Image (spheres, rainbow, N blue to C red):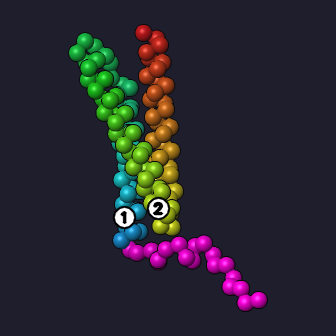
Amino acid sequence: MNTPLPSSPQSSSSAPLSRRAVWASRTLDVLLLGLCVALGGLSYYTFSLYCESFGCLGVGLLWMLWAGLAAVGWVVALVVRAWQRRRGLGSWASGLASTALLVMGVAHLLVWLGKMALK
């Protein structure tokens, strides 16, 4: 009749948070949100360019650069968020960044498909 009480899942999961982990988490959050802002600015710049003769190549290269940065940033945001959740750190900023990157990526895809359909 002396059965031990089950322990809470958080008490046995990991050691206390280190200052290094908190600092790394905050730094990664700031970098991810900064990437979202930079990609938003690059989106605005790309959408404001006109395609004239050789300029079409430049617009295409900017779109490819944007797509590559957004895809890599989204994967990094998902990995950072999983790491933060596993360590018990706050993950709202990395979640916001991954959502923003996904929404911007879908919007870019829809705009590109619309432009291709109108040609």
Residue 108 visible here: yes
User: Label 1 sits on what residue type?
Assistant: Ala
Q: Which residue is mark 2?
A: 84
Tell which of 4 and 58 is nearer to you: 4
Q: Against 11, is 117 above or below?
A: above
> Picture coordinates of residue 35 (x, y %)?
37, 46
Q: Residue at x 47, y 77 (%)?
A: 15
Where residue 39 sits: x, y (%)?
A: 37, 39
Q: Which residues are magenta?
A: 1-19
Mark sitting earlier along the chain (2/1)? 1
| Label 1 Cα neighbours within 10 Å, binned few <14 / some 14-19 / many ≥20 | few
Disc number for residue 47: none
The outermost residue toward the front is: 1
Element at label 2: helix
- Report, in whole angstroms, how far the alpha carbon at label 2 lies from the one at label 1: 10 Å
Q: Position of residue 80 (x, y in %)?
A: 42, 56
Q: Quadrant of the N terminus?
A: bottom right
Residue at (48% x, 18% y) in the render: 114
Give the answer, above or below, for where 12 lies relative to 27.
below
Q: Where is mark 1, residue-wise?
A: 24
Q: Nearer the viewer, residue 42 or 84?
A: 84
Residue 3 highlighted magenta (yes or no): yes
Report the amino acid beneath label 2.
Answer: Gln
Q: Secondary structure at mark 1?
A: helix
Outermost residue toward the bottom in this view: 2
Per the picture, the main secondary structure of the magenta-coloured stretch is loop
**The one of 2 and 39 positioned closer to us in this rendering:** 2
Residue at screen point 36% across, 64% down: 24
Compared to 113, does 18 lie above or below? below
Front: mark 2 or 1: 2
Q: Residue at x 67, y 78 (%)?
A: 6
